[in-house]
Image (cartoon, rainbow, N blue to C red):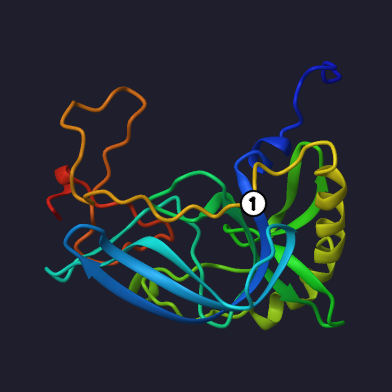
């Protein structure tokens, strides 16, 4: 069944929340804690190329909520993208105020060169981007990457594509083709703006005291790194605060 004339393509929705789409290489990382801002992890990114939106300097700092707490536990927002040192990424920076992540959660793709030197895109869950169209991105049924888990869950070092999966990269759409498509698509569905707002200033450990609704998820902070690749957000109920 076709889309109605007034119905917005799914891909237009994230662009409405985006100030710019950039390509970066993560050069370094640092973890901090502030009594007001809470735990943060800041990535220094270099070789910045602005494909869409505001021109960017060659280096940027991207600060995410999450990191080690003074009590030795670890907290992070489970929906924020994960970046790794020496990794290259195609990222959409948010156009609206943010506290947890400056990067749009649904638009953070790792760039991996295949054996021919052509850049391909890998989604957060390790699946290849196969196509891009008005309704978004299609991904592969298989994974070329597994995120760290267990004892390696909190690592910042890049983990490579396994040798046995490298031949699969060529099945993915070329990064340059994705960028060209987005630029063309944005002619009719433009990005929201060109300003990168600063992180919202708020007290990190003040939460709404009202009980969670049926759709709210109360998450806990694990005492040990979880065996799976999704870390929950620490909450008051989790006892980590």
* 67 vs 27: above or below: above
Question: Which quadrant would the N terminus be assigned to in this image?
Answer: top right
Judging by the rendered image, the residue that carries numbered circle 1 is 194
User: Where residue 86 appears, x then y in whole percent?
Assistant: 57, 83
Looking at the image, residue 88 sits to the left or right of residue 170; the answer is left
Residue 143 visible in the displayed image: no
* Residue 44 picture location, percent across and down: 49, 77
Q: Position of residue 102 (x, y in %)?
A: 49, 56
Q: Quadrant of residue 223?
A: bottom left
| Side of 169 relative to 62 (left or right) | right
The residue at 80%/55% (across/down) is 130
| Residue 76 at x, y percent in the picture | 33, 58
Q: Residue at x 39, y 52 (%)?
A: 100
Q: Is residue 58 in view?
A: yes
Task: Classify residue 52 as left or right of residue 33.
Answer: right
Query: Which element is circle 1 on?
Result: loop
Question: Which image quadrant is residue 179 in?
Answer: bottom right
């Amino acid at each position: 069944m076709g889309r109605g004339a007034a119905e917005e393509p799914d891909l237009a929705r994230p662009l409405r929340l985006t100030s710019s789409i950039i390509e970066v290489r993560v050069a370094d990382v640092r973890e901090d804690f502030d009594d007001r801002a809470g735990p943060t992890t800041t990535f220094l990114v270099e070789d910045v190329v602005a494909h869409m939106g505001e021109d960017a300097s060659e280096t940027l700092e991207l600060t995410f909520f999450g990191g080690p707490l003074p009590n030795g536990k670890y907290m992070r927002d489970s929906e924020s993208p994960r970046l790794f040192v020496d990794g290259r990424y195609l990222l959409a920076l948010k156009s609206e105020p943010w506290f947890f992540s400056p990067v749009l959660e649904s638009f953070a793709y790792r760039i991996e060169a295949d054996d021919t030197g052509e850049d391909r895109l890998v989604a957060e869950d390790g699946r290849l981007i196969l196509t891009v169209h008005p309704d978004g991105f299609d991904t592969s049924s298989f994974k070329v990457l597994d995120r760290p888990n267990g004892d390696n869950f909190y690592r910042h070092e890049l983990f490579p594509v396994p040798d046995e999966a490298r031949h699969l990269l060529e099945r993915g759409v070329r990064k340059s083709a994705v960028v060209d498509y987005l630029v063309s698509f944005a002619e009719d569905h433009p990005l929201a703006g060109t300003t990168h707002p600063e992180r919202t200033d708020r007290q990190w450990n003040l939460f709404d005291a009202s009980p969670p609704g049926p759709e709210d998820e109360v998450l806990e902070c694990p005492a040990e790194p979880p065996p799976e690749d999704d870390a929950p957000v620490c909450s008051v109920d989790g006892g980590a605060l």
